[in-house]
Image (tube, coloured by chain):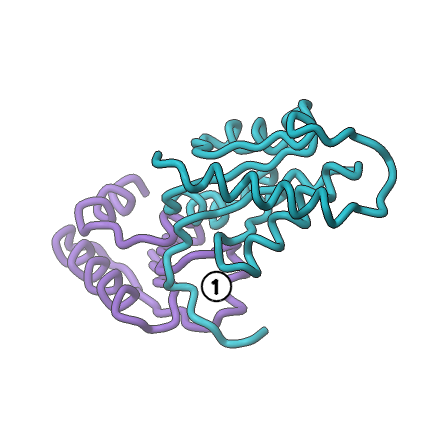
Chain colours: A cyan, B purple
Amino acid sequence: MAKECLCQANEIVVFPCSGGSNCGQIANQVAVDLTEDGVGTIFCLAGIGAHIPGMIESAKSAKRIVAIDGCSVECAKKTLEHAGLTITDYIDITKEGIAKTKNFKLSQQDILFVVKRTKQELAKER
Amino acid sequence: MKIEILGMGCPKCKKLYENAQSAVKELNVQAEIVKVEDIQKITDYGIMSTPAIVIDGEVRSAGRIPTPDEIKKWISAK
């Protein structure tokens, strides 16, 4: 692993559901893209679900907690809430007009659209 | 008691180390305070933001600098 300091505050942390559908995987790719764009930092939802204290405490120190769910089952939202974390920004991809399917050839257009929508949410004052 | 201060050695980590020292001194307890700067060991705890403090293997905070009073509460709860 590259030696890099973890002391920069993760002001915006992003939790995608990373679920088993096109929308779940779009959520994951959106979180990756937001991280690569420097907008926020992708965090591990499975670590929260597993109640890993280091991950929960790290998330608690963030100013904004973004949950991106692929669909209205809301796994990311419920996992975070179960761990006592307060979501500040929320996206449900199916509510953005993208249908949930098992087609994993993801549409770049859909990904870009959800990235844009997430950035719009983050532009709002909280 | 073992208190681990996790971080790569920046001023925030040093401040947390000092706060832990103060807490131990004020409570007059026996504790070993150890700096952990190896990023692999830090991430093994699931820590994604430093500085972090671990007391007897239990992560108490990450990504912020708890006060000596906060640390005293955690030590006293042991």
Q: Position of residue A60 (x, y in %)?
A: 40, 42
- What type is the residue that disc 1 sits on? Ile
Spot the residue most to the left: B26
Q: Which residue, given by chain and number where applicable, does mark 1 sit on? A: B42
Chain letter for mark 1? B
Give me the residue at 38% from left, 52% from top: B62
The answer to which of A115 and A42 lies nearer the viewer is A115
Estimate the x, y position of residue B2 in percent, counting from the top left. Answer: 35, 59
Q: Is residue B72 left or right of residue A116?
A: left
The answer to whether any part of residue A85 appears in the image is: no
Percent coordinates x, y for residue A97 in the rendering = 70, 28
Viewer-proximal residue among A109 and B4: A109
Residue shown at the point (79%, 30%) measured from the top left: A100
| Number of numbered discs overlaid on the protein picture | 1
Q: Quadrant of residue A88?
A: top left
Is residue A59 visible to the viewer in this orientation of the structure?
yes
| Point 32% across, 43% down: residue | B78
Give the percent coordinates (x, y) of residue A80. Answer: 53, 33
Few, some or many C-alpha atoms within 10 Å of disc 1 (few <14, some 14-19, many ≥20)? many
In the visual, does A49 lie left or right of B52? right
Q: Is residue A49 above or below residue B49?
A: above
A122 with respect to B69 (left or right):
right
Of B72 and A35, which appears nearest the observer?
A35
Rendered-image quadrant of the N terminus of chain A: bottom right
Quadrant (top left/top right/bottom left/bottom right) for the C terminus of chain A:
top left
| Residue at the image position 17 percent from the left and 46 percent from the top | B69
